Amino acid sequence: MNTNKTPATKAASDAQLIARAQRGDEDAFAALFEAHKRRVYSLCLRMTGNTAEAEDLTQEAFLQLYRKISTFRGESAFSTWLHRLAVNVVLMHLRKKGLQQISLDEVDTSQDEPVKRDYGSDDRRLTGSVDRIGLQNAIADLPPGYRTVFVLHDVEGYEHNEIAEIMNCSVGNSKSQLHKARMKLRERLHRYRDAKPPEDSVPAGESAGWT
């Protein structure tokens, strides 16, 4: 038996849960939380780069949802409406914080097997981690508006018309901010890579290939 829900079935299920939650049914709200918490957390994490902040902001977003769910009128998809609410929570947090940072602890250090260290050779797994750190820091350094559009479009997969709805801006503004975000990312990544020492550099006074 196939238990996978189609988008239409899920939307109908959400509609029923929303209607019940709007009438004060806490079980229905808990079901909405379970259905949407991962996507909201992922959005918060990518916008902040910090797991602890993402967890707190996810809770704050659902607290806001609990307070405001009665105002949902179904004029847009519930997920779009919820993500607009979550984006506003994160942007407010970033404005209050006044500092854009990312924890280097977010890099995945899990390994299936020990990595053999060969001095003088390229450690691809380490290089991949460094590249991820560079990308994460570059995203974290973007102004909140650019970062939000970039995450929503290039990471979460939203279309510009959906982003415009989430951020209460025009489609043209969304496209413009995404273009500027990509340009800034490209500039920062080039600067980051240029600053890395050459992988095959040989110390002065030594010849490669000689012992």
Image (spheres, grey):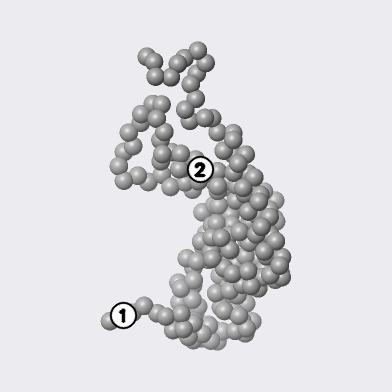
**Residue at the (49%, 76%) spot, across then down:** 32
Tell me the distance, in whole angstroms, between the alpha carbons under discs 1 and 2: 41 Å
Q: Along the horizontal axis of the image, is 173 left or right of 21?
A: right
**Residue at the (61%, 72%) spot, across then down:** 162
Instruction: Assign the N terminus to one quadrant of the image.
Output: bottom left
1 or 2: tag closer to the N-terminus: 1
Q: Residue furthest left?
A: 1
Of residues 49 and 24, the one drawn nearer to the viewer in this rendering: 49
Q: Which residue is mark 1?
A: 2
Verify CB contact (< 8 Å) between mark 1 and mark 2: no
The image position of residue 65, as x and y in percent, is 58, 74
| Location of residue 34 (image quadrant) | bottom left
Determine crowd level at label 1: few under 14, some 14-19, many 20+ residues with C-alpha closer than 10 A: few
**Residue at the (58%, 74%) spot, across then down:** 80
| Residue 197 position (above or below residue 98) | above
Determine crowd level at label 2: few under 14, some 14-19, many 20+ residues with C-alpha closer than 10 A: some
Amino acid type at circle 1 is: Asn
The image position of residue 185, as x and y in percent, is 62, 49
Q: Which residue is mark 2?
A: 131
The image position of residue 159, as x and y in percent, is 59, 69
**Residue at the (45%, 43%) spot, across then down:** 128
The image position of residue 155, as x and y in percent, is 54, 60
Amino acid type at circle 2 is: Asp
